[in-house]
């Protein structure tokens, strides 16, 4: 019997020691969106989000999307177990030093957006910076 998409995503998350919140932050997808997929209320993610999830969780994108082949392909660098831990540690640091970090994040955001406008920043840099700013903003509202 083949696993459902939700089952495969759960297996991949367990492999990477990744919580729903960590996956949500790592993919810049709402927690509710991740929850719907994991609860089986949505059959899959978009192709882009599936690719991002497989990269983030360090599993085969083809396996995650279809259930075919190996979950872990030969030659995939094994850093997935560190990624969620780094995000969790970053969240702890952000919470502990939010008042000091907020202005720094704002300045960093301005710099990255200026680089983007000049064609010098990658989409990944912009996405990561905007995610950090969004997270800081949400946490400051608490």
Image: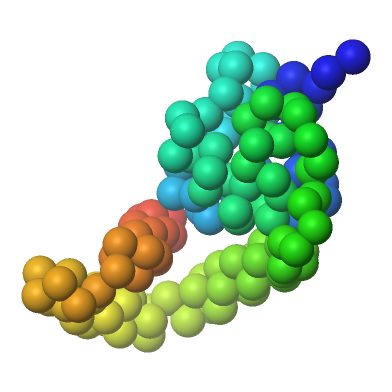
* x and y percentages locating residue 126 in the rendered image: 29, 65
Residue positioned 75% across, 63% down in the render: 75
Tell whether 25 sits left or right of 121.
Answer: right
Q: Is residue 59 above or below residue 120?
A: above
Residue positioned 81% across, 41% down in the render: 70
Residue 138 visible somewhere in the drawing: yes
Q: In this view, which residue lies farthest toward the right? A: 1
Q: Is residue 102 above or below residue 58?
A: below
Please tell me in which quadrant of the rendered image residue 68 appears: top right
How many marks the image carries: the answer is 0
Residue placed most toward the observer, 123 or 132: 123
Q: Is residue 112 above or below residue 64?
A: below
Quadrant that contains the N terminus? top right
Residue positioned 64% across, 72% down in the render: 86
Tell whether 53 sits left or right of 73.
Answer: left
Residue 113 visible somewhere in the drawing: no
Tell whether 124 sits left or right of 63.
Answer: left
Residue placed most toward the observer, 15 or 31: 15
* x and y percentages locating residue 16 in the rendered image: 77, 55
Q: What colouring method underlies this structural image?
A: rainbow
* x and y percentages locating residue 26 in the rendered image: 53, 55
* x and y percentages locating residue 10 in the rendered image: 76, 36
Please tell me in which quadrant of the rendered image residue 128 appears: bottom left
Quadrant that contains the C terminus? bottom left
Residue placed most toward the observer, 106 or 138: 106
Q: Is residue 77 above or below residue 67?
A: below
Please tell me in which quadrant of the rendered image residue 100 appears: bottom left
């Amino acid at each position: 019997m083949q696993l459902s998409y939700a089952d495969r995503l759960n297996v991949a998350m367990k492999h990477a020691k990744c919580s729903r919140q960590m996956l949500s932050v790592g993919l810049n997808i709402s927690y509710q969106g991740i929850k719907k997929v994991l609860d089986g209320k949505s059959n899959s993610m978009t192709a882009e989000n599936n690719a991002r999830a497989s990269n983030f969780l360090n599993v085969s994108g083809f396996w995650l999307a279809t259930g075919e082949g190996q979950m872990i392909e030969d030659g995939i660098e094994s850093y997935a177990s560190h990624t969620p831990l780094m995000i969790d540690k970053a969240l702890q640091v952000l919470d502990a030093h939010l008042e000091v970090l907020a202005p720094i994040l704002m300045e960093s955001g301005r710099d990255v957006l200026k680089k983007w406008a000049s064609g010098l920043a990658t989409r990944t840099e912009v996405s990561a910076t905007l995610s950090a700013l969004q997270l800081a903003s949400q946490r400051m509202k608490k």
